[in-house]
Image (spheres, rainbow, N blue to C red):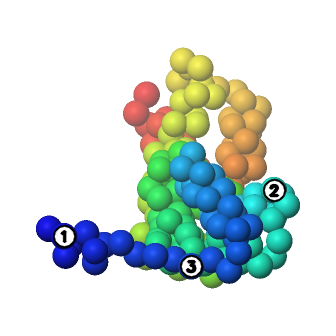
């Protein structure tokens, strides 16, 4: 048992005390929620840490796998599937400082599906108990415009809307 404990103790050496504090702050921030590399760096920078301390803290959390942008995108997609359009997800992840290439790569690998379910959910919220066939031309137009602003393709919206109309 003692050999295992000795092998498991991994030491990480920081160049100074500020770097150690920055790594500790990074760990505390990650304890509350998962963050992208860019978000974490921005938060540490906002706390007044030097560039050297920031770099060492980032290296530390990446070394132990506490921060990983690809994993962040995969998790985000998993939890937002059926709630948001591909465009909206792409925009939200871009805002968090994740590269466009990484977002597209993960989206391609996971074959993001779920836009139709999200559209159905949003339409049912907008219908407020009405049937799709009971809506006026203007009301339908407002729903289509709303979904368009959310980033959904009009062909997919029309398809889902006609499916819902046929069900009623």
Labels 1 & 3 near each other (Cβ < 8 A): no
Q: Disc 1 or 3, which lies upstream in sequence?
A: 1
Measuring from the top left, give residue 56's x and y in whole percent: 66, 77
Helix, strand or loop at label 3? It is: loop
Q: Is residue 81 left or right of residue 151?
A: left
Residue at x-position 76% and y-position 58%:
43
Look at the picture and state if 93 lies above or below 145. below
The residue under label 3 is: 13
Look at the picture and state if 33 lies above or below 107. above
Mark number displayed over residue 47:
2
The residue under label 1 is: 2
Neighbourhood count class around disc 1 (C-alpha, 10 Å): few under 14, some 14–19, many 20 upward: few
Neighbourhood count class around disc 2 (C-alpha, 10 Å): few under 14, some 14–19, many 20 upward: few
Residue at x-position 50% and y-position 65%:
66
Measuring from the top left, give residue 21's x and y in whole percent: 68, 61
Q: Disc 3 or 2, which lies upstream in sequence?
A: 3
Neighbourhood count class around disc 3 (C-alpha, 10 Å): few under 14, some 14–19, many 20 upward: few
In the image, which is nearer the foreground, mark 1 or mark 3?
Answer: 1
Q: Is residue 96 left or right of residue 82?
A: right
Q: Quadrant of residue 13?
A: bottom right
Measuring from the top left, give residue 53's x and y in whole percent: 74, 73
Residue at x-position 57% and y-position 74%:
60
Q: Quadrant of residue 91?
A: bottom right
Q: CA gap, disc 3 to disc 2?
A: 22 Å
Seen from the viewer's position, the closer of residues 159 and 93 is: 93
């Amino acid at each position: 048992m003692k050999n295992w404990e000795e092998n498991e103790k991994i030491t990480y050496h920081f160049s100074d005390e500020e770097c150690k504090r920055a790594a500790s702050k990074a760990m505390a921030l990650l304890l509350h929620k998962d963050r992208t590399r860019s978000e974490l760096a921005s938060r540490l920078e906002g706390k007044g840490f030097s560039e050297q301390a920031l770099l060492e803290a980032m290296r530390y959390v990446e070394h132990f796998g506490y921060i990983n942008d690809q994993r962040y995108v995969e998790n985000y997609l998993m939890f937002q599937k059926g709630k948001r359009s591909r465009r909206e997800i792409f925009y939200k992840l871009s805002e968090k400082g994740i590269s466009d290439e990484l977002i597209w790569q993960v989206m391609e690998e996971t074959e993001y599906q779920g836009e139709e379910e999200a559209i159905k959910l949003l339409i049912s919220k907008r219908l407020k108990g009405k049937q799709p066939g009971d809506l006026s031309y203007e009301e339908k137009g407002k729903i289509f415009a709303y979904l368009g602003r959310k980033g959904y393709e009009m062909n997919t919206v029309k398809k889902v809307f006609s499916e819902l109309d046929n069900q009623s």
